[in-house]
């Protein structure tokens, strides 16, 4: 190339810089705060500031639980740091099979397949099971991983309004009229931005009426929703009646990483044969497997942690309502505090940080325009005193910003 010729990649990098500048100007830039402690109800940032953590998915407080950490150490000592391989080559240990069997029993299915993440579980699901002769009917508020997984498949796509049974039935009728062979309705069990719990009992009834499969991503429910913490299907009275359940080990079930798909045995076996994220990505680390087995021991022993979480969520929601904040209604420990404007969400988050509370603003494109919020996430690890301190911080910041009187 001549020394006089322009560098043809310069325009690309200028476009990237411009996109970042626009994101900042629109108040949509997302910053990351660096934590220098284990995950917990209290965390310390790298600058030394200690905060009440109100934005982690650490629902049951198990990310730093002594029994979970001890089990991880034991697995590290006995099974090593990693397996350096995918499952079908030389990446399957006895503990992986044990965890899959335990999760299947916990969730009420025949079998389970582990993935590196729940995103991978959804990414490897639809294209493996469905062809262009089939149809998938998806809730409009489904997680990005579900949306991306569906895009990878050639199945016909239908989208229904959030938790709207009439609109779901419309989609089922359209899929029937189009001659779809197999049909799969897929929904989040809990919609992560709003804390809305899917009406799975009604969805199951519609699926039965039309002869349709039901799939659920229960990432924000497994371990603490339902009387025994089994998930949304337990809460809605259809335990054992969901065809496919995807989920994560990265939230209530220890908070590390890893995901799974639970289903009938033949479905799981086909995923082992053809699911690309499973076939072409390293297996879950032994210490995560060992720690998750300890988590299941804790959850199957009693419901102390899920009961405490339920109490904490009710306490905080009641306090915020009494202060006058606009909340998304519900009972889930996801409690969205609505600010509507992205800039206000960021200002509220920044002021809360000064007052000792770590709570992150959510705004476009994570949520729709003018639906910005602080998504508070309650943990069983929070004490009453910490929740009251957080409420006091919200009261101060909310009054300063004109969100409450």
Image (cartoon, rainbow, N blue to C red):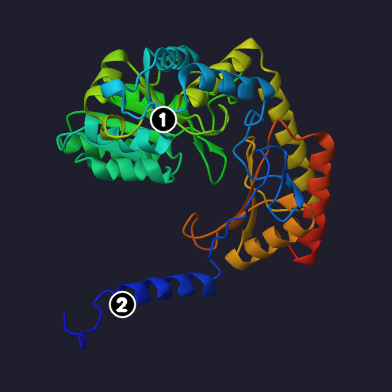
- Residue at the spot x=62%, y=31% of the render? 63
Choose between 247 and 233: the one closer to the eye. 247
* Mark 1 and mark 2: Cα distance apart in space: 45 Å
Residue 269 x/y as whole percent? 26, 18
| Residue where numbered disc 1 is placed | 216
Residue 394, placed above or below residue 239? below
Instruction: Give the quadrant of residue 122.
Output: top left
Residue at image location 67% in from the left, 46% down from the top: 36
Residue marked by disc 2 = 10
The quarter of the picture where the N terminus appears is: bottom left
10 Å crowding of disc 1: few (<14), some (14-19), many (20+): many
Q: Residue 241: give x, y in percent of width and height.
A: 40, 17
Q: Position of residue 54 (x, y in %)?
A: 69, 44
Mark before the other along the chain sequence, 1 or 2: 2
Q: Is residue 280 left or right of residue 339?
A: left
In the rendered image, is residue 404 in sight?
no
Q: Which mark is residue 169?
A: none
Please say if the residues under marks 1 and 2 sit with CB atoms less than 8 Å apart. Answer: no
Instruction: Classify 47 as above or below 10.
Output: above
């Amino acid at each position: 190339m001549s020394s006089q010729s322009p560098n043809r990649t310069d325009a690309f990098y200028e476009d990237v810089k411009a996109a970042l500048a626009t994101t900042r100007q629109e108040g949509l830039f997302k910053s990351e705060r660096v934590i220098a402690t284990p995950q917990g109800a209290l965390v310390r940032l790298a600058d030394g500031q200690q905060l009440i953590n109100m934005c982690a998915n650490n629902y049951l407080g198990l990310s730093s639980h002594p029994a979970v950490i001890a089990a991880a150490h034991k697995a590290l000592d006995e099974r090593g740091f990693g397996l350096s391989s995918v499952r079908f080559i030389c990446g399957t240990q006895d503990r992986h099979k044990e965890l899959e069997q335990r999760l299947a029993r916990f969730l009420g299915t025949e079998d389970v397949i582990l993935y590196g993440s729940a995103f991978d579980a959804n990414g490897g699901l639809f294209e493996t099971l469905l062809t262009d002769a089939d149809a998938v009917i998806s809730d409009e508020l489904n997680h990005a991983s579900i949306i991306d997984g569906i895009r990878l498949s050639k199945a016909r796509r239908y989208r229904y309004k959030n938790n709207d049974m009439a609109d779901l039935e419309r989609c089922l009728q359209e899929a029937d009229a189009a001659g779809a062979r197999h049909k799969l309705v897929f929904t989040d069990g809990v919609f992560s931005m709003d804390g809305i719990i899917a009406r799975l009992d009604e969805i199951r009834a519609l699926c039965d009426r039309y002869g349709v499969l039901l799939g659920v991503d229960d990432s924000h429910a497994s371990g603490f929703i339902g009387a025994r913490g089994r998930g949304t299907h337990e809460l809605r009275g259809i335990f054992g009646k969901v065809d496919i359940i995807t989920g994560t080990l990265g939230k209530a079930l220890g908070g590390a990483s890893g995901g799974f798909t639970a289903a009938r045995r033949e479905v799981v076996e086909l995923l082992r044969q053809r699911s690309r994220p499973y076939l072409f990505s390293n297996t879950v680390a032994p210490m995560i497997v060992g720690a998750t087995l300890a988590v299941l021991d804790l959850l199957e022993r009693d419901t102390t942690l899920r009961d405490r979480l339920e109490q904490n969520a009710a306490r905080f929601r009641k306090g915020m309502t009494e202060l006058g904040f606009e909340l998304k209604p519900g009972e889930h420990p996801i409690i969205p505090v609505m600010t509507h404007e992205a800039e206000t969400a960021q200002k509220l988050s920044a002021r809360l940080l000064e007052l000792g509370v770590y709570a992150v603003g959510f705004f476009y494109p994570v949520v729709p325009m003018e639906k910005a919020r602080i998504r508070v996430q309650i943990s069983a690890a929070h004490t009453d005193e910490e929740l009251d301190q957080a409420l006091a911080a919200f009261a101060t910041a909310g009054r300063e910003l004109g969100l409450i009187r």
